[in-house]
Image (cartoon, helix red, strand yellow):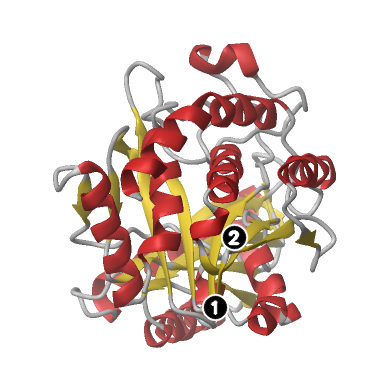
Amino acid sequence: MHSKIKELSDKYLPDAIKIRRYLHQHPELSFKEFETTKFIKRELDKLGIPYESPLETGCVGILEGGQKSDRVIALRADIDALPIQEEGEAKSEFFSKNKGVAHCCGHDAHTANLLAAAKILKDLQDDIEGTVLLVFQPGEEKLPGGGKLLTETGFLQEKGVDAIFGIHTSPMHKAGTMATKVGPLMASTSEFEVEIIGKGGHAARAHETVDPVVLAAQYINAVQTIASRNVDPTEPVVVTIGRVEGGSAHNIIPEKVKLWGTARTLSPDTEDLVIKKLEALAKGITESAGGSYKLDFNKGYPAVINSEKEAQTVLNSARTLFGDEIAIEMRRPIMAGEDFAFYQQQFPGAFFFVGSGSEEADSFYPWHHSKYNVDDRFFEIATPLMVSLVFDHQ
């Protein structure tokens, strides 16, 4: 079966590349993927694969195997793009036609890969035991996350999913490799906003004010102690303030300064500690100077935690298909996040990376970089591996 899957993957490789380029030229933002959804449905119609639409955008293809069984395997791809103006000579032939919107995170490749996998699975339909669900999910890039909304519909639960698998391009890994691990793979991704409230006035008479700029500076520095002085050093945590806004002129002390940040953790307990410390630091710093604060903390995606059986299935399938040197068992998780975590709260599942970085494609730029690109050799690993999981998972 593995050799047959590889042969079919070679056959449909040009289709995968063509679809990826088309999708790259026509990106759509989270939860607005209307034309993308129409395109996916047309491709499924060509294959004679029925689908349902639990959400306004995206859809789930339903492929009934020839071997009758209650077994249900779900394969997931995200379909949305980013609000970013892309750059990069390597992909200039298929630049986005939608100004300020681009697939600079690889979701075009994920969608193209699942459509290529659908073609192979259709060819092998008689050999499939049970049902395969092809999950084309909207809104991965925007809270609350399409994965959360889809699981809340109960659609996948009603279908009786036994296991779910998801994939992501990885510029951190060279094209021709794949990587994953058992257990924690990616971090939770929460966001917070802090408003530092002082008393404005003239810069020359600062003693009559409560300067929120100074308080914000103290707070930014103090926040760095959460990871360095409050969390066990063996516990991964990142607290980053990425945006600061306040003031209107060089000689005016403003009333307020606003800060935006993100917290990345691998455990709910650590996240709760971060929330507590963000609050305590804001309270202590502002009140000691006669100011005040407002803090909003928005819990985002949970941590991606791969179940052992499913992660081992991915690694074993990759080794069988391509050899031991291709399959990388990661030593540590990464602190980026993914709403695939919501599926894993409901079903056994594994998320994995397929290398997409190369000098030839100029594709070593990180996710969300304007020059982000995907080496076409991504599909040589991703497509046969995704298909093999349907047959290999027991």
Question: Which mark lies nearer to you, 1 or 2?
Answer: 1
Give the image quarter of residue 159.
Answer: bottom right
Amino acid found under the numbered disc labelled 1: Ser
Kindly identify the residue that appears in the image at 54 percent across and 17 percent down: 91
Which sits in the foreground, 114 or 65? 65
The quarter of the displayed image where residue 39 is located:
top right
Q: Quadrant of the C terminus?
A: bottom left
Q: Position of residue 277 (x, y in %)?
A: 43, 82
Q: Decide which of tag 1 and tag 2 comes sooner along the chain.
A: 1
Residue 245: x and y, percent? 64, 51
Using the image, determine if residue 272 lies above or below residue 114: below
Q: How many marks?
A: 2
Q: Residue at x 59, y 38 (%)?
A: 112
Q: Give the label on residue 69, or none.
A: 1
Q: Amino acid at mark 2?
A: Leu
Residue 373 shows in the view: no
Q: Is residue 308 left or right of residue 393?
A: left
Observer-nearest residue: 24 or 262?
24
SS at badge 2: strand
- Residue on which the image places disc 2: 259
